[in-house]
Each structure stands twice: as C-alpha cells, then as structure tokens.
C-alpha cells in the first residue's frame, strides 16, 4: 500500500479573493501538513525533524486512506471514442492553487530551481505506476498505462493500454504508428500531457491533483525567460502570485476584455521575440570569429533584447492589480472614427426593424423631417448596437419604445446623435452578460438623449468619455460599478438626467477635463461626484460647472476631492478642525434661540416652517460655497506650485497664459441631502 499523501486542494468553483487580499487557508480533512522548507533551512534542524516534515505522519488522510473513496469529481472526455472517465481537477479555487504552490511545491525557490522543487514534490505525492491516463496532444488522444515516472525530467514512462483506444484528426494514427512514436520518445511523455483516469478508490486522488498543478504551472504561470530574471525576491512572490491572481481575475471577468486581448497578444509576441533572441545569442556564442556577420548578429541581438525587455515590463504592468488599469487606458486610443461617407450623405438609423403603422406615422411626423424627406436616407436595424456600428459622421440613431438587451459594448468614435423616441423609461437598453464598459465615447460631438441604460456584471463604468465632447440629456443610468468617467481632455455635458446604483463614484472627473452638470439627480452611489487629483505638474486643472443638482443618499460624500496632503495644509486642517468644534455650539445657540422664540409664540407654526426653510437654504448655500472655495483654493495651490517650479528653473516672469491654469468652478443651487459622510470631503493620500 502506498504511503499517505499530502492534503491537496479541492473545490467546485472559482471564489478567488479580491486583488491584494490575503488568501484563505485551504480546507483539508484532518490535521494539516507541515509546510515544506528549503534544503539549507532543513540542514539547521535535527535530522529526525527534517525527515518528519515529509513523513507519513505529517500528512492528513486526503480521501485515499482514512476516508475510503475518492473526494474528487469525474468528467466525461470529449470526442467520439468511448474513453474512460477522468478526474475533474481543472476547477480548483484560487486559494487552493495559491496554497499548493506556496506551501508545498515552490515555497521560496528561485526560478532556476522551480523544476527541481516540482520534481521533489512529485516524488512525495505521485504514484510511480499502476494507473491509466489519457495522453492528450493537439493532434490525438490515446489511452496509456503508466509503468514508471522519471521525476527529474517530469515525465512518465508509459505503454499503450489494452484495448487500444485512440482518437485523432485523421485515421493515420494506428496501433503500429503509436507504438513507433512511443519508441522514438523512449516511452517517456510529459506529465502535464496526461489526464488521470478516474478511480473510485481514492488511491490516485493526489496523483491527479499533482499532475493538475504541474499542468497549470507550465500552461499559465511559467515563462521561458523567467530563469534569466533572478533577483532578491523569491520566484513565488515575484511571478507566480501576480500571474495566478491575474488568471482568476480574468476568469471572473474582473479585467476588461480589451486588456485581456492586449495581454495575450503581448505574451505571444514576447515569446516569439525571445525565441529569436535565443537563436541569435546561441549563434554568436558558438562562433568565435570576429567577423562582420557576427557584429551584425550582435546588433540584432541587442535590438531583440530591448524589445523583449520592453514587452516584459508591459506584461508586468498588467499582472500588477494596482497598475494594470493605468496601462489599460491606452487601449481606447485605437478607436478610429469612420468620418463622412464617400457620398457625403447622412443617414437616419431607426430601431427596431419591425414596427406598427401608427408608430411609423408618428415617427415620420415628429423625427424624420417631412420637409426634406425626398433626399433623406433611412435605414432600419434590429437592435441599437447594430445601428450604432453602422453609423458614420453626422448620422442619427432613433430608438423606438421597447426593452432592448445588448450583449456588447457601444464604441462611438464619430459625432452622432443617439436618442430614444419617448420617455427614458419607455426606451430601455440593458447590457446582457458580463463585460467591460457599456458606452465608450471618443467622438468630437456625441449626443445621447431620452434613454434608460441598465448595466449588469460590469468591470468598468457605464459610460466613459475618453476624448471629445459627449452630451447626455434626459437619461436614466442604472449603474453597476462606477458611473460616468470623464477622462483627461474630454468634456461631458449632463443635463436633466438621473444616475444611481454605482458601487464607486457616480461621476469621476479627471484632471484636464471639462464637466458640466445641470439639473441632475445623483444618488445611492458609493460617492456622488469624485474629482481626481490634479496637483501634479503634468495635469491641468479641470473645468467644473455644477448647477441645481440633487445629490443625495450616497454612502460617502456628495462631492469628494482626491489629492495629496501638503505638510503646511495638515497644520491648517488641524486648526480648522479645532475651530469647527465651536460650530455646533453656535448652531446650538441658534437652535436655542429658535426654541425660545417658539416658546414665546407657540401658535406661530408658519414662522417655524419659515425658519426651517431659511436654515436649510442657508445650509445648502454654504455647501455650494464650500465646494467652490475648496476646489478654487486647490487650483490656486497648483498655480503656486507651478510658479515655484518655474522660478527654480530660472523663469522669473511667467507668461500669463501659461499660468492661467486655475480651475474654472461654478457651483450654485445644488442640494445635498442624506449623504453618509456629508456634502463635501477631501481624501488625502
């Protein structure tokens, strides 16, 4: 009977923690194993203690000894050949793989030691013979029997099973052909190409799990250039953990699809360039002559090395959960406008394809401009996304009443109009399925009106304005993550609209942008409006106009400014807090006076209501004034910093146009009610 196996992970879904969170310990029946130590660490321990780390007593009985029967599921292989069922092991949770690699397989090894550590792990957990597996390649699947394992090479010694079962893309892989192929390979094949046949006894659970860990490592974690990037950090921390987190973030749709495509493209490109670099380097090292051809090869090798280094840095940015979105913003620059049609004609696109005669009559009367209908081209579409994708510069999309489910993203790069025919609640566009943004706008002049947008299972916000100007009028936005994002150099005009449900900010305003909010409702979000830090010298101050908005019932602040803390401002903030402690007393005095007045005139209910209205109006005016003053003061602080830096560079007189980067702020008539942390706040970092 084989010795007991170390506890292995099991699970039935994803459930990875958020990026940066500490992984939960993997559950295991019975007592947990002692984590593995490096050889140099084990030398300092007594011999019997070192051996006990890998002894049978230190492992829990994971479904193969103490509890008879397998604890793993089974799955039926795809294809037409009746292969036996195999173990279902590709469904492991994030923390289960994390624990296996960190505690038992890789520990704190270097990249160059990874293969040796894996081999040592397999020697302790893998059954060396007596089990069957399906050998899978891109060309064929064949049933084999394992008779031995070459641990240092991570290969299994196999023989064809009887009866012979094989499935291939053509009929050329006969029994004789497969036997000849195995002889060429000396009957040794990579363990990661084997899928263990299901066994109810539980004896081969750990074998199946161990091979799954090896397969996942070489498919999803290992890079051919890892060994050349040795540094002070161990391989697990430097490479394994961030790549593992990225893998599960992608599985759970936490990473925008465009960024995933970029990562996969960069990865394949880096592998191709790195292979070329190795070929050039090997050709140089094998040739000792100082010829012109070798000099050319050296120059080519240096260029390839620089390209590989640059791509590896970009890959690391995406693998880092804190930096990947900074890099990801660049992908929207590739949205290209179509421009005008070659004929110069403009088209009205109508959704849906089918409609009743009376609706068409009303639509023609109200929207299709009967005075010029002779020269007007109208196209009908089945869904809004198809209509927008068919648009050119200057086109117009009219969406008739209905509830439209869209599986995709609206990428608008031309100046078009998108409007609903009716009230927003009558024209609903709902995002179906998981994905990224709902609307991405880069056109010079885009107008969206009379629509209700509903977002589900999102990765990014409901609407992103990356470039140009986007006007949003009389719309309802039911958000999922963040709401509207106004990027640097972009402009948003939002009027008479309602936004709610964002788990982040309802509106995010980036440095160098322009945002005008008129007569809107922003409520039930994490924060109402968030103004990003713009103190850095590379940023310009945003232009913000907020008039007659109702900002209420947000979890945090109605409006919050994110910015770094200055040492001098920390002292001022402390002084303001001290002064602020006296304000409740003053407010209490006013309340006491009002109470005294009510006691003197108990029947004057009208005066009491008037006093309440005046107090509320005064409070709202103070809130608007405070927001305008703080944003203006921050802009003035940026001007001072900029002037000081110019002075340090020797510019004693600065051009007024250069220095006129103060924020244009107009904040008036807004109402702030029932926000969890107050009307306005500053988040220092």
Image (cartoon, rainbow, N blue to C red):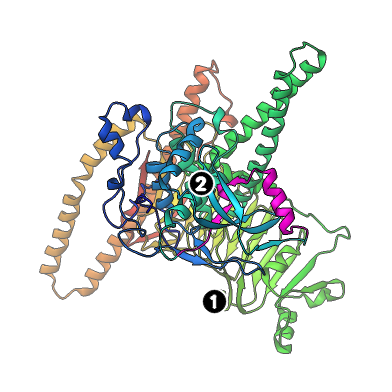
Secondary structure beneath label 2: helix
> Where residue 344 appears, x then y in whole percent?
86, 60
Q: Which residue is mark 2?
A: 214
- Distance CA(mark 1)–CA(mark 2): 53 Å
Residue beneath the point at 67% across and 48% down: 182
Q: Quadrant of the C terminus?
A: top left
Q: Which mark lies nearer to you, 1 or 2?
A: 2
Establish if 371 lies above or below 684: below
Q: Is residue 610 left or right of residue 165?
A: left
Q: Which mark is residue 425?
A: 1
Please name whichever residue, 58 or 106, is drawn nearer the observer in this view of the structure.
58
Please name whichever residue, 43 or 622, is drawn nearer the observer in this view of the structure.
43
User: In terms of sequence position, does the residue under pointer 1 or pointer 2 come before the other?
Assistant: 2
The 10 Å Cα crowd at callout 2, few under 14, some 14 to 19, many 20 or more, is: many
In which image quadrant can residue 312 be found?
A: top right
Please give the range of residues in magenta. 172-199
């Amino acid at each position: 009977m084989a010795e007991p196996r170390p506890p292995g992970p099991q699970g039935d879904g994803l459930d990875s923690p958020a990026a940066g969170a500490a992984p939960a310990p993997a559950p295991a029946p019975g007592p947990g194993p002692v984590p593995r130590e490096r050889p140099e660490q084990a030398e300092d321990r007594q011999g019997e203690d070192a051996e006990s780390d890998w002894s049978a007593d230190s492992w829990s009985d994971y479904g193969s000894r103490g509890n008879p029967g397998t604890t793993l599921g089974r799955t039926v292989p795809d294809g037409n050949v009746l292969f036996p069922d195999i173990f279902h092991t590709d469904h492991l949770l994030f923390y289960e793989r994390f624990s296996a690699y960190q505690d038992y397989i890789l520990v704190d090894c270097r990249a160059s030691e990874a293969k040796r550590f894996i081999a040592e792990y397999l020697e302790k957990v893998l059954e060396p013979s007596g089990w069957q597996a399906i050998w899978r390649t891109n060309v064929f699947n064949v049933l084999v029997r394992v008779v031995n394992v070459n641990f240092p090479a991570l290969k299994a010694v196999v023989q064809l099973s009887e009866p012979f079962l094989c499935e291939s893309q053509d009929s050329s892989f006969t029994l004789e052909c497969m036997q000849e192929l195995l002889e060429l390979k000396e009957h040794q094949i990579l363990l990661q190409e084997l899928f263990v046949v299901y066994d109810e006894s539980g004896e081969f659970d750990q074998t199946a799990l161990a091979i799954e860990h090896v397969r996942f490592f070489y498919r999803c974690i290992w890079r051919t250039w890892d060994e050349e990037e040795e540094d002070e950090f161990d391989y697990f921390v430097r490479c394994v953990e961030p790549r593992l987190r990225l893998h599960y973030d992608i599985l759970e749709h936490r990473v925008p699809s465009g960024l995933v495509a970029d990562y996969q493209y960069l990865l394949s490109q880096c592998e191709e360039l790195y292979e070329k670099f190795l070929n050039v380097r090997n050709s140089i090292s094998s040739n000792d002559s100082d010829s012109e051809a070798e000099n050319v090869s050296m120059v080519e090798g240096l260029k390839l090395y620089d390209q590989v280094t640059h791509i590896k840095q970009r890959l690391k940015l995406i693998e880092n959960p804190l930096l990947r979105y900074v890099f990801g913003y660049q992908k929207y620059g590739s949205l290209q406008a179509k421009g005008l049609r070659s004929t110069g004609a403009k088209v009205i696109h109508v959704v849906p394809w089918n409609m009743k005669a009376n609706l068409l009559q009303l639509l023609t009367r109200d929207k299709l401009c009967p005075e010029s209908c002779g020269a007007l081209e109208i196209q009908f579409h089945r869904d809004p996304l198809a209509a927008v994708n068919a648009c050119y510069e200057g086109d117009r999309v009219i969406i008739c009443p209905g509830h439209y489910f869209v599986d995709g993203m609206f990428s608008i790069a031309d100046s078009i109009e998108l409007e609903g025919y009716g009230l927003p609640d009558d024209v609903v566009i709902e995002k179906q399925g998981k994905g990224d943004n709902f609307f991405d706008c880069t056109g010079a002049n885009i107008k969206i009106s009379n629509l209700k947008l509903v977002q589900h299972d999102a990765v990014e916000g409901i609407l992103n304005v990356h470039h140009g100007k986007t006007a949003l009028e009389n719309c309802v936005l039911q958000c999922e993550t963040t709401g509207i994002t106004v990027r640097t150099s972009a402009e948003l005009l939002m009027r008479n609209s309602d936004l709610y449900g964002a788990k982040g900010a309802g509106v995010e305003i980036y440095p160098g942008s322009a945002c005008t909010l008129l007569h809107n409702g922003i409520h039930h979000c994490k924060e109402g409006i968030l103004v990003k830090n713009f103190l850095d010298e590379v940023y310009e101050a945003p232009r913000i106009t907020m008039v007659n908005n109702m900002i209420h019932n947000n979890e945090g602040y109605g409006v919050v400014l994110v910015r770094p803390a200055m040492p001098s401002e920390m002292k001022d903030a402390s002084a303001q807090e001290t002064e602020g402690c006296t304000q409740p007393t003053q407010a209490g005095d006013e309340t006491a006076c009002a109470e005294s007045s009510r006691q003197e005139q108990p029947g004057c209910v009208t005066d009491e209501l008037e006093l309440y209205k005046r107090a509320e109006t005064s409070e709202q005016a103070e809130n608007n004034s405070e927001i305008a003053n703080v944003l203006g003061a921050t802009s003035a602080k940026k001007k001072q910093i900029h002037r000081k830096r110019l002075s340090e560079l020797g510019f004693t007189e600065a051009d007024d146009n250069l220095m006129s980067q103060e924020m244009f702020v107009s904040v008036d008539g807004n109402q702030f009610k029932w926000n969890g942390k107050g009307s306005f706040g500053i988040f220092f970092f």
